[in-house]
Amino acid sequence: MTNEPLRIGVLGAARIAELSIVGPARAGGHRLIAVAARDRHRAEVFATAHGVERVVDSYAALLADPEIEVVYNPLANGLHGPWNLAALQVGKHVLTEKPSASNAQEAAEVQEAAAKAGTVFMEGFHYLFHPVTRRLHELLDGGELGDLRHIETMVAMPAPPEGDVRWSLPLAGGALMDLGCYSLHAQSFLAPWAGGRPGLVAARGGERAGAPGVDEWLYADLEFPNGVTGSARCHMGYHRWRMSCRIVGSRGEATAVNFVQPHLDDRVVVRTAAGERTEELGRRSSYTYQLEAFAAHLRDGAPLPLDADDALTTMQLIDECYRAAGFSVRPRTALLPVG
């Protein structure tokens, strides 16, 4: 049935979940069947606040729930891979926060598990579904900017507190994992106008004081098959929030002021010989567009631009960037015996 609601289980009571799954589920009429967290009290508070139907005692119990068809995974980065694998192995569809795994080897196992399960796996690059990003693609398609020449992405934020999981190497933390994946992914999805996906030319980064092996910032230089160049930057100790994507063509350029959080700023600024204009594309949440696309795929077979293959390709590029910048790739996190 086309209008049958998705039956969703949520792993953890993460802060992002209200924006990333609760609001979109409510907007689409989908059911939040269950939530599990390491602390049951936190799960109960989350369930009460967000209309989740029940609380279960562990992540494993949530995966075993036969009523749940979609597992949403917003856990710490290092727990994405293990629980994505576990969910796929029991035949669930998976919508995971990015990145899909801690490193390319683990992402390859996720890809293999998704193929074996025959279920839908999608990494939550929600920005891709919003009219802001679609407009950048339209501007290239329509020819107003001419031929694509250069891409600049910058995803930066003020530093999270000391002790935050995003600074934890064992939990696959770092600026590139948390923020830079958006910079790299947005550039990779401009491949149709650049002769194919980008290759890494060089990368440099800086370590977070007090967090050995964890990158506070990382800048990567990319080159595409037809000579288009890219600068993909991320910084998790920046003086302000900045999440911009600028595309430069032979006849003009366009900048999405905040392509990652268009619900906060939906402007696309276009500059050509004819002048400058600002387009406002709407502040409806990119996460809502994402869940709509996910549901349309599951219910109606509508095309979905993201899958486990794309997730692996992204993770391979992340690993390359880490190595080129002098960091080790992120280690795997072993599943704990309790959920």
Image (cartoon, helix red, strand yellow):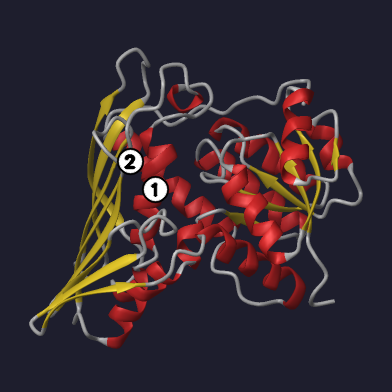
Using the image, determine if residue 300 lies above or below residue 154: below
The residue tagged 1 is: 317
Quadrant (top left/top right/bottom left/bottom right) for the C terminus: top right
Residue 265: tell me if it is visible: yes
Compared to 138, does 82 lie above or below? above
**Can you say whether 241 is above or below 272 in the image?**
above
| Closest to the observer, 181 or 111 | 181
Query: Hey, which quadrant is residue 78 in on the image?
Result: top right
Residue 320 position in % (x across, y down): 36, 42
Graded by Cα atoms within 10 Å as few (under 14), some (14 to 19) or many (20 or more), the crowding at tag 2 reads many
Which quarter of the figure is the N terminus placed in? bottom right
Say which residue appears at 83% left-offset and 46% top-offset: 90
Mark drawn on residue 321: 2
Residue at coordinates 41% horizontally, 47% vertically from top-left? 181
Task: Pinpoint residue 254: horizontal percent, then vertical percent.
Answer: 22, 70
Which residue, as the protein is rendered here, is positioned at the far left?
A: 273
Closer to the camera in the image, 83 or 202: 83
Where is residue 8? Give x, y as percent.
Answer: 77, 52
Q: Are marks 1 and 2 in contact (CB under 8 Å)?
A: yes
Can you see residue 111?
Answer: no
Who's the residue at 45% across and 51% down the image?
Answer: 314
Instruction: Kindly identify the amino acid type of the residue bearing the numbered disc 1.
Output: Leu
At numbered mark 1, what does the secondary structure look like: helix, strand or loop? helix
- Mark 2 is on which residue type? Cys
Whether residue 264 sits left or right of residue 155 in the image: it is right
Give the class, few, some or many, for how many residues have Cα within 10 Å of label 1's Cα (few <14, many ≥20). Answer: many
- Asked which secondary structure carries label 2, the reply is helix
